[in-house]
Amino acid sequence: MLGDRFSSGNFILSNDFIVTEQQQIASLLYKYLQGSLTETETFVLETWRMQSEANQRFFEVLQNDEQVSQWIAENHPNRLQDFEERIYAKVLHKISYLRVTPIYKRAWFRVAVAASVFFLAGLIYWTNFPKKQADIIEVTNFKPTNDIEAPKFTKATITLADGKIIAVDDLTAISQSSVQLTKTADGNIVYSGNSEESVYNTLTNPKGSKVIDLKLSDGSHVWLNVGSSISYPVAFSGKERKVTITGEAYFEVVHNESIPFKVSKGGTVITVLGTHFNVNAYEDEAFIKVSLLEGSIKVMKDQQESPVMHAGQQAIVTSDIKIRNNIAMDEVMAWRNGIFKFNKTDIQSMMRQAERWYNIQVAYPKGIPPEIFTGEISRDVNLSEFVKILRYSDVRTNISGNVLTINP
Protein backbone atom coordinates (compact mmCIF):
# COMPACT_ATOMS: atom_id res chain seq x y z
CA MET A 1 0.00 0.00 0.00
CA LEU A 2 2.89 2.32 0.71
CA GLY A 3 4.83 1.25 -2.36
CA ASP A 4 4.01 4.53 -4.10
CA ARG A 5 5.84 6.45 -1.37
CA PHE A 6 5.41 10.20 -1.65
CA SER A 7 3.78 11.25 -4.90
CA SER A 8 5.45 14.28 -6.41
CA GLY A 9 2.98 17.08 -5.71
CA ASN A 10 2.87 20.37 -7.55
CA PHE A 11 3.11 22.76 -4.60
CA ILE A 12 6.81 22.76 -5.40
CA LEU A 13 6.90 21.84 -9.06
CA SER A 14 10.63 21.75 -9.76
CA ASN A 15 11.87 18.16 -9.93
CA ASP A 16 15.07 19.30 -8.23
CA PHE A 17 13.24 19.47 -4.93
CA ILE A 18 11.30 16.19 -4.74
CA VAL A 19 13.48 14.64 -2.03
CA THR A 20 13.51 17.84 0.00
CA GLU A 21 9.73 17.91 -0.23
CA GLN A 22 9.55 14.34 1.04
CA GLN A 23 11.54 15.24 4.11
CA GLN A 24 9.47 18.34 4.76
CA ILE A 25 6.17 16.50 4.35
CA ALA A 26 7.38 13.89 6.85
CA SER A 27 8.07 16.67 9.33
CA LEU A 28 4.63 18.14 8.76
CA LEU A 29 3.02 14.74 9.34
CA TYR A 30 4.88 14.53 12.63
CA LYS A 31 3.69 18.00 13.67
CA TYR A 32 0.16 17.10 12.56
CA LEU A 33 0.15 14.25 15.10
CA GLN A 34 1.38 16.68 17.72
CA GLY A 35 -1.39 19.14 16.88
CA SER A 36 1.19 21.90 16.40
CA LEU A 37 0.85 22.81 12.71
CA THR A 38 0.73 26.50 11.81
CA GLU A 39 -1.81 27.80 9.28
CA THR A 40 0.78 27.73 6.49
CA GLU A 41 1.98 24.24 7.43
CA THR A 42 -1.60 22.94 7.52
CA PHE A 43 -2.16 24.38 4.05
CA VAL A 44 1.03 22.79 2.67
CA LEU A 45 0.20 19.36 4.12
CA GLU A 46 -3.37 19.52 2.83
CA THR A 47 -2.16 20.62 -0.62
CA TRP A 48 0.24 17.68 -0.75
CA ARG A 49 -2.41 15.23 0.48
CA MET A 50 -4.87 16.26 -2.24
CA GLN A 51 -2.34 15.92 -5.06
CA SER A 52 -2.99 12.20 -5.63
CA GLU A 53 -4.69 9.09 -4.33
CA ALA A 54 -1.24 7.73 -3.45
CA ASN A 55 -0.64 10.68 -1.14
CA GLN A 56 -4.05 10.20 0.45
CA ARG A 57 -3.34 6.49 1.06
CA PHE A 58 0.07 7.34 2.47
CA PHE A 59 -1.51 9.87 4.84
CA GLU A 60 -4.09 7.35 6.05
CA VAL A 61 -1.71 4.42 6.46
CA LEU A 62 0.87 6.47 8.36
CA GLN A 63 -1.72 6.83 11.09
CA ASN A 64 -1.57 3.05 11.67
CA ASP A 65 1.73 1.94 13.17
CA GLU A 66 1.12 -1.76 12.44
CA GLN A 67 0.76 -1.17 8.69
CA VAL A 68 3.86 1.03 8.65
CA SER A 69 5.94 -1.59 10.45
CA GLN A 70 4.68 -4.27 8.07
CA TRP A 71 5.65 -2.18 5.03
CA ILE A 72 9.16 -1.61 6.38
CA ALA A 73 9.63 -5.32 7.09
CA GLU A 74 8.38 -6.33 3.64
CA ASN A 75 10.29 -3.76 1.60
CA HIS A 76 13.55 -3.24 3.49
CA PRO A 77 14.18 -6.21 5.81
CA ASN A 78 17.96 -6.16 5.34
CA ARG A 79 18.29 -2.47 6.14
CA LEU A 80 16.02 -2.40 9.14
CA GLN A 81 18.62 -3.08 11.84
CA ASP A 82 21.23 -0.71 10.39
CA PHE A 83 18.62 1.99 10.01
CA GLU A 84 17.48 1.56 13.60
CA GLU A 85 21.01 2.10 14.85
CA ARG A 86 21.37 5.27 12.81
CA ILE A 87 18.09 6.94 13.48
CA TYR A 88 15.81 5.33 16.03
CA ALA A 89 17.51 6.83 19.06
CA LYS A 90 17.01 10.28 17.55
CA VAL A 91 13.36 9.50 16.87
CA LEU A 92 12.73 8.34 20.43
CA HIS A 93 14.39 11.47 21.75
CA LYS A 94 12.06 13.60 19.67
CA ILE A 95 8.87 11.77 20.53
CA SER A 96 9.60 11.90 24.25
CA TYR A 97 8.55 15.54 24.03
CA LEU A 98 5.29 14.87 22.23
CA ARG A 99 2.40 16.98 23.41
CA VAL A 100 -0.66 14.79 24.01
CA THR A 101 -3.48 15.61 21.60
CA PRO A 102 -7.00 14.18 21.30
CA ILE A 103 -6.40 12.62 17.87
CA TYR A 104 -6.40 9.08 19.25
CA LYS A 105 -7.70 7.53 22.45
CA ARG A 106 -4.48 5.97 23.77
CA ALA A 107 -1.25 7.89 24.32
CA TRP A 108 1.00 4.94 23.47
CA PHE A 109 -0.66 4.65 20.05
CA ARG A 110 0.01 8.32 19.27
CA VAL A 111 3.66 7.88 20.17
CA ALA A 112 3.98 4.74 18.07
CA VAL A 113 2.47 6.46 15.04
CA ALA A 114 4.70 9.50 15.43
CA ALA A 115 7.71 7.22 15.68
CA SER A 116 6.58 5.42 12.54
CA VAL A 117 6.29 8.67 10.61
CA PHE A 118 9.80 9.78 11.40
CA PHE A 119 11.13 6.23 11.08
CA LEU A 120 9.66 5.85 7.60
CA ALA A 121 10.67 9.37 6.55
CA GLY A 122 14.25 8.65 7.48
CA LEU A 123 14.12 5.32 5.66
CA ILE A 124 12.88 6.97 2.48
CA TYR A 125 15.70 9.49 2.59
CA TRP A 126 18.33 6.83 3.40
CA THR A 127 16.99 4.57 0.61
CA ASN A 128 17.23 7.33 -1.99
CA PHE A 129 20.69 8.43 -0.87
CA PRO A 130 22.45 5.37 0.64
CA LYS A 131 25.88 7.03 0.55
CA LYS A 132 24.77 9.98 2.66
CA GLN A 133 23.96 10.11 6.32
CA ALA A 134 20.23 9.94 6.94
CA ASP A 135 19.14 13.02 8.80
CA ILE A 136 15.66 13.86 9.98
CA ILE A 137 14.89 17.32 8.63
CA GLU A 138 12.18 19.26 10.40
CA VAL A 139 10.51 22.41 9.13
CA THR A 140 12.35 25.08 11.07
CA ASN A 141 10.52 27.92 12.75
CA PHE A 142 11.25 31.01 10.70
CA LYS A 143 12.21 33.85 13.04
CA PRO A 144 12.60 37.01 10.98
CA THR A 145 14.66 39.88 12.27
CA ASN A 146 11.82 42.07 11.08
CA ASP A 147 8.24 41.47 10.01
CA ILE A 148 5.52 43.30 8.16
CA GLU A 149 1.85 42.91 8.95
CA ALA A 150 -0.86 42.50 6.36
CA PRO A 151 -2.89 45.69 5.85
CA LYS A 152 -5.33 46.25 8.71
CA PHE A 153 -7.05 49.40 7.44
CA THR A 154 -7.43 51.49 4.32
CA LYS A 155 -4.93 54.17 3.31
CA ALA A 156 -7.04 55.22 0.33
CA THR A 157 -7.53 58.86 -0.62
CA ILE A 158 -10.01 60.76 -2.78
CA THR A 159 -8.84 63.63 -4.95
CA LEU A 160 -11.71 66.08 -5.46
CA ALA A 161 -12.32 68.18 -8.56
CA ASP A 162 -10.61 71.19 -6.97
CA GLY A 163 -7.45 69.15 -6.26
CA LYS A 164 -8.08 68.71 -2.56
CA ILE A 165 -7.03 65.28 -1.26
CA ILE A 166 -9.05 63.64 1.51
CA ALA A 167 -8.11 60.48 3.39
CA VAL A 168 -11.00 58.02 3.24
CA ASP A 169 -10.60 57.33 6.95
CA ASP A 170 -11.28 61.04 7.61
CA LEU A 171 -14.25 61.24 5.24
CA THR A 172 -17.63 62.16 6.71
CA ALA A 173 -19.93 63.74 4.09
CA ILE A 174 -19.20 66.07 1.17
CA SER A 175 -21.51 67.68 -1.37
CA GLN A 176 -20.27 68.24 -4.94
CA SER A 177 -22.57 69.63 -7.62
CA SER A 178 -25.67 68.31 -5.83
CA VAL A 179 -24.06 64.87 -5.40
CA GLN A 180 -23.47 63.53 -1.90
CA LEU A 181 -20.24 61.70 -1.09
CA THR A 182 -20.47 59.62 2.10
CA LYS A 183 -18.76 56.72 3.82
CA THR A 184 -20.69 53.79 5.25
CA ALA A 185 -20.08 52.27 8.67
CA ASP A 186 -17.97 49.50 7.14
CA GLY A 187 -15.78 51.98 5.25
CA ASN A 188 -17.32 51.83 1.77
CA ILE A 189 -17.57 54.98 -0.35
CA VAL A 190 -20.96 55.97 -1.76
CA TYR A 191 -21.97 58.64 -4.30
CA SER A 192 -25.65 59.53 -4.58
CA GLY A 193 -27.55 62.17 -6.52
CA ASN A 194 -27.64 63.62 -10.03
CA SER A 195 -25.82 66.42 -11.77
CA GLU A 196 -25.30 67.63 -15.32
CA GLU A 197 -21.88 69.05 -14.51
CA SER A 198 -18.72 67.16 -15.48
CA VAL A 199 -17.10 66.90 -12.06
CA TYR A 200 -14.51 64.15 -11.62
CA ASN A 201 -13.00 62.52 -8.54
CA THR A 202 -10.12 60.06 -8.29
CA LEU A 203 -9.98 57.28 -5.73
CA THR A 204 -6.43 56.07 -5.06
CA ASN A 205 -5.71 52.90 -3.09
CA PRO A 206 -1.95 52.74 -2.42
CA LYS A 207 0.24 49.74 -1.70
CA GLY A 208 -0.10 48.35 1.81
CA SER A 209 -3.81 49.23 2.05
CA LYS A 210 -7.02 47.23 2.38
CA VAL A 211 -9.19 46.63 -0.67
CA ILE A 212 -11.83 49.35 -0.89
CA ASP A 213 -15.42 49.32 -2.15
CA LEU A 214 -16.80 52.22 -4.19
CA LYS A 215 -20.45 52.73 -5.13
CA LEU A 216 -20.84 55.03 -8.12
CA SER A 217 -23.78 57.37 -8.62
CA ASP A 218 -25.55 54.93 -10.98
CA GLY A 219 -25.42 52.18 -8.34
CA SER A 220 -22.54 50.27 -9.94
CA HIS A 221 -19.97 48.81 -7.52
CA VAL A 222 -16.20 48.87 -7.93
CA TRP A 223 -13.72 47.06 -5.70
CA LEU A 224 -10.26 48.58 -5.97
CA ASN A 225 -7.20 46.47 -5.27
CA VAL A 226 -4.00 47.86 -3.74
CA GLY A 227 -1.68 49.94 -5.91
CA SER A 228 -4.67 51.03 -8.01
CA SER A 229 -6.77 54.08 -8.84
CA ILE A 230 -10.00 54.97 -10.59
CA SER A 231 -11.17 58.33 -11.99
CA TYR A 232 -14.91 58.84 -12.46
CA PRO A 233 -17.59 61.53 -12.63
CA VAL A 234 -19.43 62.17 -9.38
CA ALA A 235 -22.60 61.75 -11.46
CA PHE A 236 -22.95 60.21 -14.92
CA SER A 237 -24.50 62.30 -17.67
CA GLY A 238 -24.61 62.08 -21.44
CA LYS A 239 -24.62 58.97 -23.61
CA GLU A 240 -22.04 56.87 -21.77
CA ARG A 241 -20.71 56.08 -18.31
CA LYS A 242 -16.93 56.24 -18.53
CA VAL A 243 -14.23 55.63 -15.91
CA THR A 244 -10.45 55.31 -16.12
CA ILE A 245 -8.35 52.94 -14.03
CA THR A 246 -4.82 51.94 -13.17
CA GLY A 247 -3.94 48.69 -11.40
CA GLU A 248 -6.75 46.24 -10.72
CA ALA A 249 -10.48 46.61 -10.17
CA TYR A 250 -13.53 44.38 -10.08
CA PHE A 251 -16.79 45.81 -11.44
CA GLU A 252 -20.43 44.95 -10.90
CA VAL A 253 -22.14 47.28 -13.35
CA VAL A 254 -25.81 48.22 -13.17
CA HIS A 255 -27.53 47.39 -16.45
CA ASN A 256 -28.52 50.34 -18.63
CA GLU A 257 -28.80 49.43 -22.30
CA SER A 258 -29.15 53.03 -23.43
CA ILE A 259 -26.05 54.25 -21.57
CA PRO A 260 -23.12 51.82 -21.93
CA PHE A 261 -20.46 51.63 -19.25
CA LYS A 262 -16.84 52.00 -20.41
CA VAL A 263 -13.59 51.31 -18.58
CA SER A 264 -10.40 52.67 -20.14
CA LYS A 265 -6.72 52.09 -19.48
CA GLY A 266 -4.37 53.70 -21.96
CA GLY A 267 -5.48 52.62 -25.42
CA THR A 268 -7.66 49.79 -24.07
CA VAL A 269 -11.41 50.33 -23.66
CA ILE A 270 -13.88 47.81 -22.23
CA THR A 271 -17.52 48.39 -23.14
CA VAL A 272 -20.38 46.83 -21.17
CA LEU A 273 -24.08 47.31 -20.59
CA GLY A 274 -24.38 45.55 -17.25
CA THR A 275 -22.09 42.79 -16.08
CA HIS A 276 -19.47 41.51 -13.61
CA PHE A 277 -15.83 41.57 -14.70
CA ASN A 278 -12.28 42.04 -13.43
CA VAL A 279 -9.57 44.19 -14.99
CA ASN A 280 -5.90 43.63 -14.13
CA ALA A 281 -3.90 46.48 -15.67
CA TYR A 282 -0.86 46.95 -13.43
CA GLU A 283 2.03 48.74 -15.12
CA ASP A 284 4.53 46.09 -13.99
CA GLU A 285 2.57 43.24 -15.58
CA ALA A 286 3.28 42.13 -19.15
CA PHE A 287 -0.29 42.60 -20.38
CA ILE A 288 -3.79 43.67 -19.42
CA LYS A 289 -6.19 40.88 -18.44
CA VAL A 290 -9.95 41.37 -18.65
CA SER A 291 -11.87 38.47 -17.08
CA LEU A 292 -15.63 38.12 -17.47
CA LEU A 293 -17.66 36.48 -14.71
CA GLU A 294 -21.17 37.39 -15.83
CA GLY A 295 -22.86 39.05 -18.81
CA SER A 296 -21.02 40.14 -21.95
CA ILE A 297 -18.42 42.72 -22.90
CA LYS A 298 -16.28 43.92 -25.78
CA VAL A 299 -12.64 44.93 -25.53
CA MET A 300 -11.03 47.45 -27.87
CA LYS A 301 -7.31 48.14 -28.26
CA ASP A 302 -6.57 51.15 -30.44
CA GLN A 303 -8.42 50.19 -33.66
CA GLN A 304 -8.81 46.48 -32.86
CA GLU A 305 -12.00 45.13 -31.33
CA SER A 306 -12.61 41.74 -29.76
CA PRO A 307 -15.68 39.66 -30.49
CA VAL A 308 -18.36 39.76 -27.82
CA MET A 309 -16.99 37.98 -24.76
CA HIS A 310 -19.05 35.69 -22.56
CA ALA A 311 -18.79 34.45 -18.97
CA GLY A 312 -15.68 32.37 -18.30
CA GLN A 313 -13.58 34.09 -20.96
CA GLN A 314 -10.55 36.32 -20.55
CA ALA A 315 -9.06 38.89 -22.91
CA ILE A 316 -5.26 39.20 -22.98
CA VAL A 317 -4.38 42.64 -24.29
CA THR A 318 -0.89 43.44 -25.60
CA SER A 319 -0.39 44.91 -29.06
CA ASP A 320 -3.43 42.85 -30.02
CA ILE A 321 -6.28 41.04 -28.25
CA LYS A 322 -6.40 37.30 -27.60
CA ILE A 323 -9.37 35.51 -26.01
CA ARG A 324 -8.89 32.60 -23.61
CA ASN A 325 -11.68 30.22 -22.63
CA ASN A 326 -12.56 28.30 -19.45
CA ILE A 327 -10.61 30.56 -17.12
CA ALA A 328 -10.20 29.59 -13.46
CA MET A 329 -12.14 32.52 -12.03
CA ASP A 330 -11.36 31.53 -8.45
CA GLU A 331 -7.75 32.41 -9.20
CA VAL A 332 -8.73 35.70 -10.87
CA MET A 333 -10.96 36.66 -7.95
CA ALA A 334 -8.66 35.45 -5.17
CA TRP A 335 -7.77 39.01 -4.15
CA ARG A 336 -11.47 39.85 -3.71
CA ASN A 337 -11.91 36.72 -1.61
CA GLY A 338 -9.05 37.57 0.73
CA ILE A 339 -6.48 35.03 -0.45
CA PHE A 340 -3.36 34.69 -2.54
CA LYS A 341 -3.93 31.87 -5.04
CA PHE A 342 -1.13 30.55 -7.22
CA ASN A 343 -1.30 28.05 -10.07
CA LYS A 344 2.10 27.14 -11.51
CA THR A 345 3.15 30.70 -10.72
CA ASP A 346 6.75 31.85 -11.02
CA ILE A 347 8.37 33.55 -8.07
CA GLN A 348 8.50 37.02 -9.66
CA SER A 349 4.75 37.02 -10.27
CA MET A 350 4.15 35.96 -6.68
CA MET A 351 6.44 38.66 -5.36
CA ARG A 352 4.79 41.41 -7.41
CA GLN A 353 1.58 40.63 -5.55
CA ALA A 354 3.46 40.64 -2.25
CA GLU A 355 5.13 43.97 -3.08
CA ARG A 356 1.76 45.64 -3.55
CA TRP A 357 0.00 44.04 -0.59
CA TYR A 358 2.75 44.46 2.00
CA ASN A 359 4.22 47.65 0.44
CA ILE A 360 7.71 46.18 0.20
CA GLN A 361 10.59 45.95 -2.23
CA VAL A 362 11.92 42.56 -3.33
CA ALA A 363 15.59 42.02 -4.12
CA TYR A 364 17.24 39.06 -5.89
CA PRO A 365 20.97 39.64 -5.26
CA LYS A 366 21.98 36.14 -6.38
CA GLY A 367 19.57 35.80 -9.27
CA ILE A 368 15.94 34.81 -9.63
CA PRO A 369 15.07 31.29 -8.41
CA PRO A 370 13.43 29.14 -11.12
CA GLU A 371 10.82 27.47 -8.90
CA ILE A 372 7.12 27.68 -9.63
CA PHE A 373 4.37 27.23 -7.05
CA THR A 374 0.76 26.13 -6.77
CA GLY A 375 -1.36 26.78 -3.69
CA GLU A 376 -3.15 29.45 -1.69
CA ILE A 377 -2.77 31.34 1.56
CA SER A 378 -4.79 34.00 3.39
CA ARG A 379 -3.98 37.63 2.65
CA ASP A 380 -4.34 38.32 6.38
CA VAL A 381 -1.05 36.66 7.33
CA ASN A 382 2.13 38.59 8.07
CA LEU A 383 4.89 38.68 5.48
CA SER A 384 7.00 36.20 7.46
CA GLU A 385 4.16 33.67 7.23
CA PHE A 386 3.65 34.35 3.52
CA VAL A 387 7.30 33.68 2.64
CA LYS A 388 7.21 30.32 4.41
CA ILE A 389 5.68 29.10 1.15
CA LEU A 390 9.06 29.73 -0.48
CA ARG A 391 10.95 27.99 2.28
CA TYR A 392 9.41 24.65 1.35
CA SER A 393 11.77 24.76 -1.63
CA ASP A 394 15.45 25.68 -1.44
CA VAL A 395 14.63 29.39 -1.67
CA ARG A 396 15.89 31.43 1.28
CA THR A 397 14.48 34.76 2.42
CA ASN A 398 15.33 37.63 4.73
CA ILE A 399 13.24 40.61 5.80
CA SER A 400 15.07 43.82 6.67
CA GLY A 401 13.09 47.03 6.93
CA ASN A 402 10.73 47.01 3.97
CA VAL A 403 13.06 44.91 1.79
CA LEU A 404 12.51 41.21 1.24
CA THR A 405 15.68 39.54 -0.03
CA ILE A 406 15.31 36.26 -1.93
CA ASN A 407 18.19 33.90 -2.67
CA PRO A 408 18.21 30.56 -4.51
Image (cartoon, helix red, strand yellow):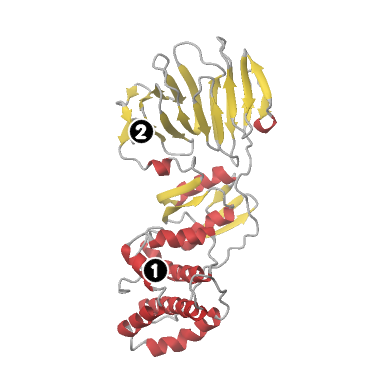
Residue 394 coordinates in the image, percent (x, y)? 47, 63
State which tag comes first along the sequence, 2 or 1: 1
Between 75 and 128, the one lying in front of the other is: 75
Give residue 305's quadrant in the image: top left
Contact flag, marks 2 and 1 (Cβ < 8 Å): no
The residue at the far front in this view is 105
* Disc assigned to residue 279: none
Residue 403 coordinates in the image, percent (x, y)? 60, 51
Give residue 155's quadrant in the image: top right
State the SS at label 1. helix
Residue at image position (46%, 69%) is 29
Crowding at dot 1, Cα within 10 Å, few <14 / some 14-19 / many 20+, comes out as some
Q: Quadrant of the N terminus?
A: bottom left
State the SS at label 2. strand
Kind of residue sitting beneath label 2: Ala
In the image, residue 243 above or below residue 120: above
Kind of residue sitting beneath label 1: Phe
In the rendered image, which residue does mark 2 sit on? Answer: 315
Residue 172 coordinates in the image, percent (x, y)? 69, 26
Residue at image position (49%, 57%) is 389
Asked whether the viewer can see residue 395, the reply is: no
Between 164 and 182, the one lying in front of the other is: 182
Residue at image position (62%, 22%) is 181
Residue 324 coordinates in the image, percent (x, y)? 31, 37
In the rendered image, which residue does mark 1 sit on? Answer: 59
Mark-to-mark CA distance, 2 and 1: 41 Å
Between 17 and 308, the one lying in front of the other is: 308
Q: Is residue 153 left or right of residue 342?
A: right
